[in-house]
Image (tube, rainbow, N blue to C red):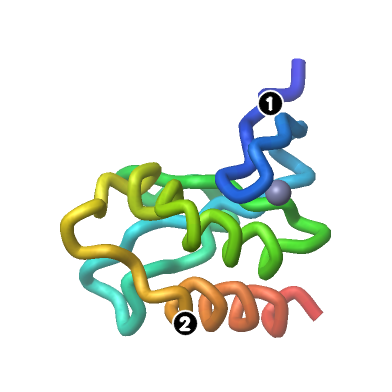
Amino acid sequence: MTPVRMCQGCRTRRPVEELIRLKYTPTGDSLIAVDGTSRLPGRSVYLCRDHPEDCAGRAHRSRSLARGLRMMEQGIPLEDVLSALSHARSKEE
Ligand SMILES: [Zn+2]
């Protein structure tokens, strides 16, 4: 059985292969990293793989991104999310 998770932006439930997993990484250059291997510790959220920037924007506006990562107090810069996404995409290509 393929695990199903919910996109934090559009709230759609999809198989994990169709989602990108984001992690809060306080030790990295950016607060957010794309977790391709699902092996990093800590809280994570998912975004649709086919349009992650759209869903990141929605999740950011509704604050569900910060809530999902337990970062309500600090908040999450949308730029960090978008740069993590574009970084992961450039690695895939
Ligand atoms: Zn989505």
Tag 2 residue: 79
Asked whether residue 41 appears in the rendered view, the answer is no
- Position of 91 with respect to 87 (left or right) is right
Residue 81 appears at what percent x and percent y?
A: 49, 72
- Position of 64 with respect to 66 (left or right) is right
Q: Classify the position of the N terminus by image quarter.
A: top right
Name the residue at 40% across, 68% down: 32
Asked whether residue 44 appears in the rendered view, the answer is yes
Mark found first going from the N terminus, 2 or 1: 1
- Residue 7: image quadrant is top right
Q: Is residue 67 above or below residue 1?
A: below
Tag 1 residue: 4
Secondary structure beneath disc 2?
helix
Q: Nearer the viewer, residue 4 or 58?
A: 58
Q: CA distance from mark 2 to mark 1?
A: 27 Å
Name the residue at the front extreme.
62
